[in-house]
Image (tube, rainbow, N blue to C red):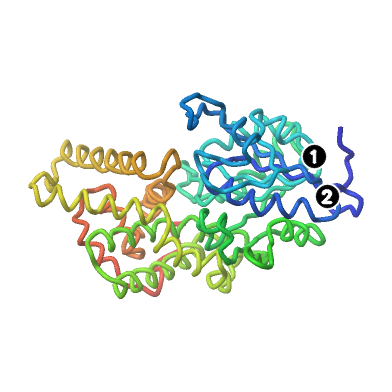
Amino acid sequence: MFESNPQNSADQVERVCIVGSGNWGSAIATIVGSNCERLENVATRVNMWVYEEEIETSDGSMKPLSRIINDSHENVKYLPNVKLPQNIVAVTDVCDACEGATLVIFVLPHQFLPGIIDKIKHVIHPSSRGISLIKGLDFDAHNKLPMLISTNISEWMTSSGGPREFQCGVLMGANVAHNVAMKEVCESTLASAFGEPADEQTRLIFHDEKTFRVQHVMDVAGAEACGALKNIIALGAGFVDGIGLGSNTKAALMRVGLKEMAKFCRLFWGESVCESTFFESCGMADLITTCFGGRNRKCAEAFAKIALAENQNGTGENSQDCDEIYSVENSCKNTWKKVEEELLNGQKLQGTLTLLEVQVILESRGLENEFPLMSKIYEISFKGAPVNNIVDGIVVTEKISSYSNL
């Protein structure tokens, strides 16, 4: 069993667990594993929870993914040809993986969080803290409000027998997983308010001066919201690529997109959001790399090409009849599903999910015209609007007309 020392105690041995083992989870494991080997007062072993799958090997036999990872130190499905540090240990029982953990790193689709947290909150260290690498937003369906995933993690953790004071920060930035795993130089933003020395200890667990340079900020809301909203803008960037427009158009879209991201953050999180956050890696840099190299851009380009082909063949839907509108929406969703299955190898597309939730929020307050780019991306993605209409969203409205409906 573990001792109940406070998480900032000098003699507390840090025990790190990574909850999730997909593309990004495996990539960050290459950094975290190496750091945990060399840092003082940090346990060398890092458990990584793996959702067990049977994988066909080169000799045609089927083996559990966890066994392959532990034997070959490679996640052959989600991050092939990249060696994981030997101190990264794949564990298939999430409670076993998290037992005694003082730092829990969440990097999995956020839809699975409630069930996972309900299991692990009873076995983590009493003074444990968390860092979310999940780039999305939760949604309060009753109040039509965006909810920070980190806030929900904290609340779920502290309910019904969990740690009394569980805090969760975020790590967001221009961090395409494969590039991180290849040790290409990049930056990332750690946003947390644990207090010293826990903030710095957490930063050092992720930081590598040579290849993965982490800056710390206090603005959790701004950093996390940027990480989610940039995926919507990346869909628009993919549409630009799909219809064959160039870098000038994409640059204009990204500039307008960044302004809409900042407007959305200030609208729903107010003064807690810092202007400087949008110029950190979690803001402008993440937007740039996602609009040029992320999975949302890639899938949106494929979606655009399919939509163009259907219009050229005369199969596009333009009617406003209710039944036909419903048919168009289903057709769009099926296209996204097909693209995701063909291009992402089991990974999930977060931009479309965030887009749907953001649109509900905007429509509930009559703010669609205040966010013309996000609204246009929605119309193309789910209402069958011509993909060429993406350029109509590249406009700027400087002021929110009213805050009274929030």
Q: Residues within 10 Å of mark 2 (few under 14, many from 20)?
A: many
Amino acid type of the residue tagged 1 in the rendering: His
Vertical position of residue 26 compared to residue 365: above or below:
above
Vertical position of residue 341 compared to residue 201: above or below:
above
* Quadrant including the N terminus: top right
Frontmost residue, 259 versus 52: 52
x, y percent for residue 171: 61, 57
Q: What element carries label 2?
A: loop
Vertical position of residue 386 compared to residue 282: above or below:
above
Compared across the picture, whether 250 is left or right of 121 comes to left
x, y percent for residue 21: 58, 40
Frontmost residue, 281 versus 112: 281
Q: In the rendering, which numbered label is found on residue 125?
A: 1
Q: In the rendering, which numbered label is found on residue 305?
A: none
Q: Which residue is drawn at 51% across and 46% down?
A: 138
Amino acid type of the residue tagged 2 in the rendering: Gln
Residue furthest left as drawn: 314
Q: Which residue is drawn at 51% across and 44% down?
A: 80
Q: Dots 2 and 1: beta carbons under 8 Å? A: yes
Compared across the picture, whether 27 is left or right of 324 comes to right
Q: Which residue is drawn at 68% across and 66% down?
A: 216
Compared across the picture, whether 144 is left or right of 64 comes to left
x, y percent for residue 9: 89, 52
Residue furthest right as drawn: 11
Frontmost residue, 57 versus 198: 57
Of label 2 and label 1, which has the lower sequence position?
2
What residue sits right under mark 2 in the picture? 7
Q: How many marks?
A: 2
Q: How crowded is mark 1: few (under 14 residues within 10 Å), some or many (20 or more)?
A: many
Q: What element carries label 1?
A: loop
x, y percent for residue 293: 42, 60
Label 2 to label 1: alpha-carbon separation: 9 Å
